[in-house]
Image (cartoon, grey):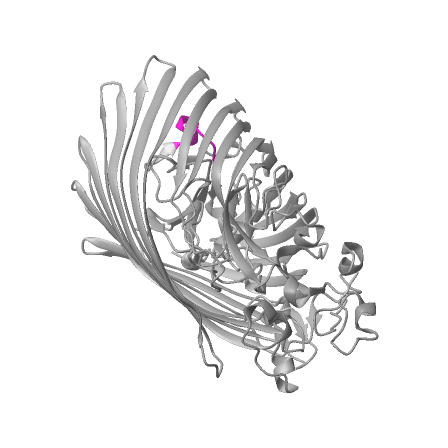
Amino acid sequence: MIIALLLQAPVIEAKPFVPVEQARMLDEVIVTARRTETPVEEVPGSVEALDRATVNQPGLFRASDLAGLSASLTERSIFGSSAPQFFIRGIGSNDVNPSANPGVAVYLDQAFISSPLAQNVALFDLSGAEVLKGPQGTLFGRNATGGALIFKTNSPGAEPGLEFSAGAGTFGLQAYDVAVDTGRLGPFRARVAATYRKSDGYTSNTLTGGKENGVDTFAIRLRADSDSEGPWSASLLLDYANDRSGMTAHEGLGLFAPEGFATPPPAGPVLIPCAPKRTLAGECLNLLGYKYSADPFAEGYDRISREDLDTGGAVLTLTRSGDIDATSITSFRYADRDVREDTDASPLDLVALDFNNESRAFTQEFLLSGRQDRFDWRAGLFGLSENLSTTNRFSTLGALRKAGVGFIDDPSLFVFGPFRLAQSYKLDTRSVAVFAETDFQASDRLFLTAGARATQERTSFRTLTRFEEVTANPVLSPERRGRQTNDAISWRLAARYQVSERRVAYVSVNRGFKSGSFNGGALFPTDTIGPVAPEFVTAWEAGSTWGITERLSVNAAAFYYDYSNLQDYTLRSTPPPARQVLDSADAEMRGLDLTLRTLLARDLKLRVGASWLEATYTDFVDANGVNRSGNRLTASPEFSAVANLSWQGSLGDDWTLGADLGANYRSEIFFDNTNDPLLQSDGRTLVNAAVTLGHVRTGVSATLAVRNLTDEVVVSDALPITNYGFIQRTLEPPRAVFFTVRSAIR
């Protein structure tokens, strides 16, 4: 990830010290997990609410950063700006292609973001976020087998106002944020917010003397809300983001022993695989005999990796309040991505990839809700139309080409000869759903919930791969087409019991569905394009929300998931090289979640989240015929925990002083179903800290913050490019320090 992910200068208005009388109770938590604002105690399921101060804290810039705030949420991505891969309780998608079906639904306000290209929402000027855990089988959008992430923008203020911040930090960071409230403009009020980040990057290119992982990004949002007292209301959200950052620079691990290159026979070197410990020690070589740098943040790159990303869209929400509330949500979103990658992460031209993707998506949702006697109900219709176009270009062994080795038109020998090819594919998706859910008050203390969602999804896929070489047969893989229609019923049953005034217990069972998928990485004629069967998850859960005192609240849940037809993506080492495969597997999960909020003192708050997860394949024989049953699922740590300690005090009548200390622990995770030790990230603890001095009367504050205080080196993703003798890894940023000044004028 690039440094802008860690160096956020949020717009937060400096606020006066809260008197003792007002600081003796925890704030009430309101969530939208039921498609309407509801106290978290009334939700029969696991929801983690992150307030404005939390999502706007120093160091958060993209949606992928939320993984540092929730113990149940994991994120991995071989890219940087785009295509985050979210996992909640071990369920998500490990497919790196934009044709992937994300298992976690992402929402901006009430609008569903379908394409993974556009899901790394910029975290600026937000009023909060929610992590919905477990299958969302009724009320939320397509493919929400793992859960949902909901990002909520700030609503326009009733009076004119200005918020501004400017910051600077390590690696040449410059950061600016601004938000303007227009106040009332006739029947509307509007808010415009923008953010800009620029930095040099934190990885040194020893070949050019420059820096990699630099950031250059700009984003803007306009939100206009109606300001009338009638039954009708409207809200319009327009947003655009322009990202011209360098792609996350990779680190390489060589896989061949040095002695294999010492005395090559006439036919070529005898390649001897390295042992895992030697590989991790950095003693091994890639296919062309290159030994990677021992410094994880310094390497010689012969290509300047970049990731140009443009995303944007519009959301129009119309609401009519009455005995039956009606809402229409119309959304259009687009994403254009152009990636240039130095895949082998070395000064040798071994493997280079270029990706060009375009996504256009339109969604329409109608919601109705009401209350009759003892029934609270919600119902609706959902429709999605998405078109994805992709062109991928692959170039291998360019160094041999420059040395005079010619193209070999034999797929079985690709690893021994240079080749260039281009793959293009299109994926069209049409999805419609009808859903309903109702709560029945069976008694003063007992509430029963039942809901269902009927979905029909149709997808069509076509792909073609051609050599970009002078050859008698330029078509490597002729055009192949596939179509599928998935019909499914997902559902939810739950019971909530008011044990006491401050304690609620619930049990639930959910059936989640994710539609079938096609293999966007099917480059070669031997690669199957699919379709892969749809996923189903049956999730059993029991939990409790307990306000032990006015100063201490605990949420706890235990769960068991039965997971069938998991869509598992892997890179295979069998010829042809870098073969991409989508398999179906069965798995099961069991675990515990705990969230604790407490006021340790009148001005000292503590928030702790912890998770235990056992997630394993129960029936899985992969495409190579290897039985992976019993292996751990990708991106699923056994233990994880987050903690944040915040303090705010006063310095006389005019000044406030605040301090925040946060820690994020995660045990080891694997990036591949093989559970190979070379494709894992060790357990780690990341520590962040910040100190803020604020002036009450002027609304000016200054923050000094540090991310990754102990300077941990953490692997964030890994892909095995074993045919070419290396593993491609990305790393989380090293320690970074920055200083920010903020001002708010009302």
Rendered view: 406 above or below 136: below
Residue in view at x 83 percent, y 68 percent: 259
Question: Where residue 88 sits: x, y (%)?
Answer: 51, 41
The answer to which image quadrant residue 241 occupies is bottom left
The answer to which image quadrant residue 571 occupies is bottom right
Looking at the image, residue 556 sits to the left or right of residue 714; the answer is: left
Give the total of numbered labels.
0
Rendered view: 111 above or below 255: above
Question: Where residue 408 sits: x, y (%)?
Answer: 57, 77
Residue 241 in view of the camera: no
Question: Where residue 233 sits: x, y (%)?
Answer: 20, 46
Residue 462 in view of the camera: yes
Looking at the image, residue 67 sits to the left or right of residue 711; the answer is: left
Q: Is residue 510 magenta?
A: no
Residue in view at x 64 percent, y 70 percent: 345
- Range covered by the magenta-colored residues: 39-48
Q: Quadrant of the N terminus?
A: bottom right
The one nearer the camera, 210 or 247, is 247
